[in-house]
Image: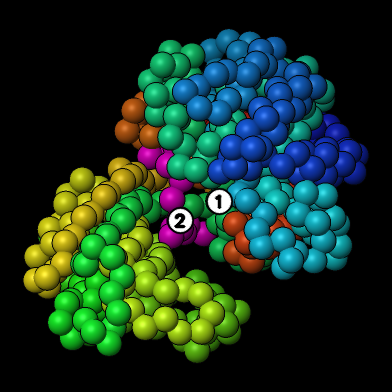
Amino acid sequence: MVTTQETIDTIDYIRDNRERYLGELKTWIACPSVSADPARHADVRRSAEAVVARMRAAGLTVAEVLETDGLPVAYGSWLHAEGAPTVLIYGHHDVQPEDPVALWVSPPFEGTVRDGKIFGRGSVDDKGQVLMHLAALEACLHARGSLPVNVKVVVEGEEEIGSPSFEAFLAREKDRLACDVVVVSDTAVFAEDVPSLTVSLRGLVHWEVTVSGPASDLHSGYFGGLVVNPIEALARMIATLRDADGRVAVAGFYEGVRELAPAERSEIASLPFDAARAAAALGVDGLEGGERDRVPLERMWVRPTLELNGIYGGYQGPGGKTIVPSFARAKLSARLVGNQDPAHVKRAVREHLERVAPAGVRVEIESDGDVRAVSTSRDHPAVAAAARAMERGFGKPPVFIGTGGTIGPVSSFDRILHLPQVLIGVGLPDDAIHAPNEKFDLAQFYGGIETMAYLYDELAEALR
């Protein structure tokens, strides 16, 4: 961790320009780049163009919008560090819908600062964390005239809808995106005073289950008790998915799930996690979901889960309507870990539900998603470099954590380009991503910019 005059000048530049960076983030938040809403796809393109303009302002020598089969990707590069490693920085510029708007304290697309935080959709997921890199690159180029590594930046516009075009984009642009390591800043630290590096992400698959009965809704007085009620049938089917201890009861579901080593269990147990406080913050009586013989952090990070995401059928209006409904439908998803094969899990759950379906109904099951879990070796030199950078940026060595979430492109980089990845986000667990009042603590934002500036130096040394 050698501090040179160039490093000092870079950090001084970052600190002198904090207010400008904050203004830039406010402006970017004001672009409602909601990829899920076709009516806002023009805003998604406008957001990509804004990223390209910011890349040029930072000093990248290439900056352009690249088309995909769907929404655009912003791409930039600076490749003038002869003999140095090449780092690919990934992020996304699309955001989640702002609904329900009534629950926002301030307008979702204004970027309002209060209590040392900036509130707005995309503030931390992922516009603020992308801006950390662009600001750090600008600072390095301004203070030194060059970068210690070659840099490529990819900021996509479909992450919040599952990145449906990204794998085809990666395959098409494989040569353009060639690099030594991928850096992703789309994750959170364990807590405000606990710097962290994420070393595992869970995978993801989905099902939609439709149970059909009579050709139309029936009068329950005439036909109740004569025909099988599809809602009841679906409820009985879903109830078989877990046993009394919270373990998934689908044959073959746990194939590929690795048990933790004693040292890994001890490491998780040493983290300052208060289950009662976490439950209170979530508004529940306790963290009782899932496998009861596993501690909460193990269930969150390294155990698979099978969840019921939605269920509907029959009459939903005011008052009563005495019917036997014609159908019922449920949406389910599974988070995968270790070496679980998405295709195998989709097939196992489908076959289980078909097997337990009662006579008298018809069952149709559609499945989607093939995102595998991804683990990053903490022994890789790039991860060690990131740990040193985070210690320099936040004053403490980081702990290594997992995350229960899924970032599809991380799996894609792993599977298609076979690249090592560093997951170095600085969001906080209470940032309300995907929810009303999403925010980014300014101390994390500014500390993140400095951390990324340190990261480029550390990667240059570690990957030489």
Task: Kindly identify which residue carries mark 2.
Answer: 405
Compared across the picture, whether 437 is left or right of 458 comes to: right
Would residue 117 be visible to someone looking at this image? yes
On residue 117, the disc is: none
Compared to residue 407, the image places residue 5 above or below, namely: above
On screen, residue 30 versus residue 326, left or right, reads right
Q: Give above or below for 458 relative to 207.
A: above
- Identity, as a three-letter code, of the amino acid under mark 2: Gly
Q: Which residue occupies 47% across, 23% down?
A: 69
Could you tell me which secondary element the residue under label 1 belongs to? Answer: loop
Question: Which class describes the residues within 10 Å of circle 1: few (<14), some (14-19), or many (20+)?
Answer: many
Tell me, yes or no, whether the highlighted magenta stretch contains residue 401.
Answer: yes
Asked if the stretch drawn in magenta spans residue 386, the answer is no
| Amino acid residing under circle 1 | Thr
Q: Are marks 1 and 2 in contact (CB under 8 Å)?
A: yes
In the foreground, 442 or 39? 39
Q: Which residue is mark 1?
A: 187
The residue at 42%/81% (across/down) is: 321
100 lies above or below 64: below
**Residue 6 sits in which quadrant?**
top right
Question: Toward the viewer: 309 or 399?
Answer: 309
Magenta segment range? 392-411
